[in-house]
Amino acid sequence: MEMDQLMLIVALFLMGVGTVSFFSGLLVILSKVMGSSVAKIALETKKVVQKGIAEEVAGLIGNASILLNSINELIKTATGVGVFLMLIGILLMSGSIYLLIQLQ
C-alpha cells in the first residue's frame, strides 16, 4: 500500500468520525435543550411556586427554586457537551480536509 493511499484512507476515516461527532453534538443540543421533559418539569415547578406563594409556604418555594436552578445547570451541561462534540467534529473534518489538500 502506498503512502498516498494510506493518507487518503486516514483522511476519509477522519472525515467520517468528524461528521458523526458533529451531528451527534447537534443531536445532543437539540434533544436535551429542546426536550419536552425539561419544559414539563419547569412548568410543574412554576405551578408549585405559585401555589407556595398563595399559601405562604416558604420551604416549598425554596425547594422549587433549587429545582429550577438544577434544571438550568442540566441544560448548561447538555449544551456544553453538545458544543464540545461539535467542535471536535469540526476539528476532525478540518484535519481531514488538510490531509486531502496535501495529497494533491
Image (cartoon, rainbow, N blue to C red):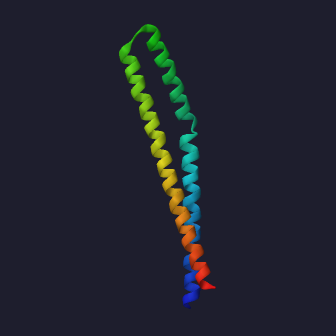
Q: How many marks?
A: 0
Q: In percent of the image, x 60 and y 74: which residue is there? A: 97
Quadrant, the N terminus: bottom right
The location of residue 67, given as percent across then percent down, is: 42, 29
Q: Choose top left, top right, bottom left or bottom right for residue 35.
A: top right
Q: Which residue is situated farthest in the right direction here? A: 104
The spot of residue 47 in percent (x, y) is: 51, 19
Query: Residue placed at 51% from the left, 29% from the top?
Result: 41
Outermost residue on the top side: it is 55
Residue 12 percent location from the top left of the image: 59, 74
* Visible residue check, residue 20: yes
Decide if residue 96 is on the left or right side of residue 63: right
With respect to residue 101, does 69 lie above or below?
above
Which residue is outermost to the bottom?
Answer: 2
Image height of 95 relative to 40, above or below: below
- Residue at image coords 37%, 14%: 58
Q: Dividing the image into 4 quarters, which one contains the C terminus?
A: bottom right
Residue 50: horizontal and vertical position, in percent? Answer: 49, 15
Please say if 76 is above or below 8: above
User: From where the camera sits, is residue 1 visible?
Assistant: no
Image point (45%, 12%), residue name: 53
